[in-house]
Image (cartoon, rainbow, N blue to C red):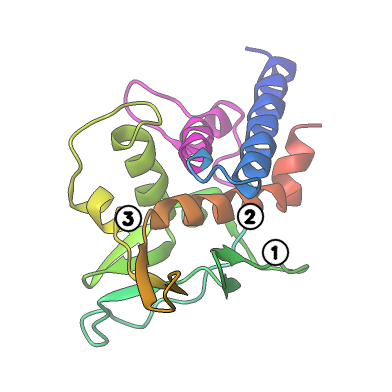
Amino acid sequence: MTHQELQQHLRRQITFLRNSAAAYDQGSPEEGIRIAVVLRVLFYDTGSCTSLLKHMGKKDTLQLVTTAGTLPPTIAANPLDFGELLRGMVLGETIHYAPVPDGSPTLTCRDWCKQTIYIHDNKPYSRADVFLTAAHLDGGAHVNEPDIALMALRDGFWMKVSRDANGVEVHESIGDTHFRMLRRLADELLHSPDLLDLAT
């Protein structure tokens, strides 16, 4: 394919990201799965599958915005049952993230995909773990039996507290952690000048 044809594909994927982010914000959290499919198209390489950014020759140099905090020096020395490393979380009726700050740091594509953003039962999960699990198991590109990663990402660690008609507190688990994180990853990409410039 020519560079112009690849650019057209990239513009299409960025449009998908924007549309899914908007639909998510309007009350369709399952759009997180569609975001995962876009990330798979952009970044996923195997022996028989080449990512769009590798086709474009940019996977090693492209800089992408990150909002993730730093992982503790060693998880073994600092055991964590649970942790979300994406910064800017806002707790309320729903859990969402504040806008991506101007001047956020960047990472190369490969490092962005490998960066840990979630910890569950002392096991780290990278961005790639999150989007590939959603795409390959949870209905993005395939539907398969949930594995330990998908169960961890679906786990409802956070609780929503409300009151019923009788004034009794009701505790409701907020699950599908991966939907929320995938929405944040879309924001990171949509605030990455290198990626947006590559499409123009």
Q: Nearer the viewer, residue 76 or 46?
A: 76
Comparing labels 1 and 3, the label whose residue is closer to the camera: 3
User: What whole-number distance in Å separates the C-alpha atoms at marks 1 and 3?
Assistant: 22 Å
The percent coordinates of residue 18 (x first, y second) are 69, 39
Of the 4 image quadrants, the one containing the C terminus is: top right
Region of the chain picked out in magenta, as a range: 32-61
How crowded is the residue under tag 2: few (<14 C-alpha within 10 Å), some, or many (20+)?
Answer: many
Cβ atoms under marks 1 and 3 closer than 8 Å: no
Could you tell me if residue 108 is visible in this image? no
Three-letter code, disc 3:
Leu
Compared to residue 103, the image places residue 129 above or below, namely: above
Q: Residue at x 70, y 64 (%)?
A: 100
Mark number displayed over residue 100: 1
Quadrant (top left, top right, bottom left, bottom right) of the N terminus: top right
Is 105 one of the magenta-colored residues?
no
In the image, is 76 to the left or to the right of 181?
A: left
Q: Secondary structure at mark 1?
A: loop
Disc 3 designates what residue? 153
Residue 37 x %, y %: 47, 33
Q: Which mark is residue 73?
A: none
Judging by the rendered image, the residue that carries numbered circle 2 is 188
- Nearer-the-camera pick, 183 or 200: 183
- In this rendered view, identify the residue nearer to me: 35 or 43: 35
